[in-house]
Image (cartoon, grey):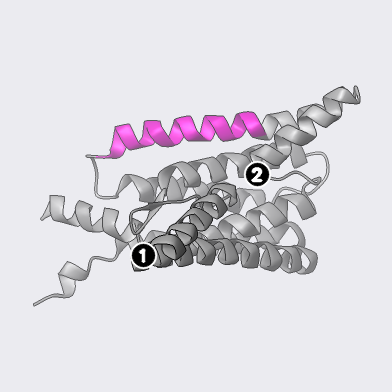
């Protein structure tokens, strides 16, 4: 029973609903960090790398550090996610992905109390860390590799599948393309949601993606087998 429950957890983490919720939170956090925490993209490390290079070329050393730190924090988050997977994958009552979500929720809850301004660099570190944990821990939807906190790869994969669907009249490729484009639209919706929420609620709007992650946590806890006769 224990092993079957773990398999069920893995299957639920692969659902389109979970992927959409995580992507909604990812888009929200990017808009939140940009709007309220100094114009830094917490998720889009490629953008931060470009801005880091631009500030270096302008000899604006202190400003360049503001873009370097989230990049390093993201890398550290990936390492921690892999460590947590190796440590908790076969231990305890909770699935290791739920432990990752719990860490994310604690960090986002704390961020809501940190004022904007001098602490922005620390907050961006924490958000980048959260995004890295998420993107490393949730990597597939219905077997398709995707990212919940960035969309360049999703756009490439979706367009590639769309080409194959048209060329070979392959319904499976078309279905996969629709899933990728749906995830992209959800990410954009999350960014729009994050923009207006940040304007209305300020720094505490970060508790909205926290609520979304809590929903995912409980979705992973639900075991349909318990309700079967």
Task: Provide the residue designation for mark 2.
Answer: 44
SS type, badge 2: loop
Can the viewer see residue 214?
A: no
Q: CA distance from mark 2 to mark 1?
A: 32 Å
Q: Which residues are magenta?
A: 71-89
For this view, does 14 lie left or right of residue 157? left
Which of the pair 215/13 is nearer the observer? 13
Within 10 Å of the Cα at label 1, are there few (<14), some (14-19), or many (20+) other Cα atoms?
some
Q: In which quarter of the view is residue 220 placed? A: bottom left
Specify whether residue 85 is painted magenta: yes
- Quadrant where the C terminus sits is bottom left
Name the residue: 80% across, 48% down: 116
Tag 2–tag 1 contact (CB < 8 Å): no
The image position of residue 196, as x and y in percent, is: 75, 68
Q: Which mark is residue 86?
A: none
Q: Which residue is mark 1?
A: 170
- Given residues 163 and 87, the one toward you in this image is 163
Q: Which residue sits at x=65%, y=38%?
A: 45
């Amino acid at each position: 029973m224990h092993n079957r429950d773990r398999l069920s957890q893995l299957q639920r983490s692969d659902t389109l609903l979970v992927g959409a919720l995580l992507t909604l939170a990812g888009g929200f956090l990017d808009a939140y960090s940009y709007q309220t925490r100094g114009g830094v993209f917490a998720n889009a490390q490629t953008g931060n790398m470009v801005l880091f290079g631009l500030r270096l070329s302008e000899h604006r050393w202190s400003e360049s550090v503001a873009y370097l730190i989230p990049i390093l924090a993201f890398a550290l988050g990936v390492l921690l996610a892999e460590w947590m997977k190796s440590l908790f994958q076969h231990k305890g009552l909770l699935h290791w992905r739920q432990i990752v979500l719990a860490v994310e929720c604690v960090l986002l809850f704390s961020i809501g109390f940190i004022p904007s301004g001098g602490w922005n660099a620390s907050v961006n570190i924490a958000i980048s860390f959260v995004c890295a944990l998420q993107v490393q821990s949730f990597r597939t939807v219905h077997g398709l590799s995707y990212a919940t906190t960035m969309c360049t790869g999703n756009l490439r994969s979706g367009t590639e599948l769309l080409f194959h669907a048209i060329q070979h009249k392959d319904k499976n490729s078309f279905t996969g393309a629709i899933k990728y484009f749906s995830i992209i639209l959800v990410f954009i919706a999350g960014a729009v949601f994050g923009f207006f929420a940040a304007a209305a609620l300020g720094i505490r709007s970060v508790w909205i993606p926290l609520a979304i992650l809590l929903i995912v946590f409980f979705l992973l806890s639900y075991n349909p087998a318990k309700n079967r006769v």
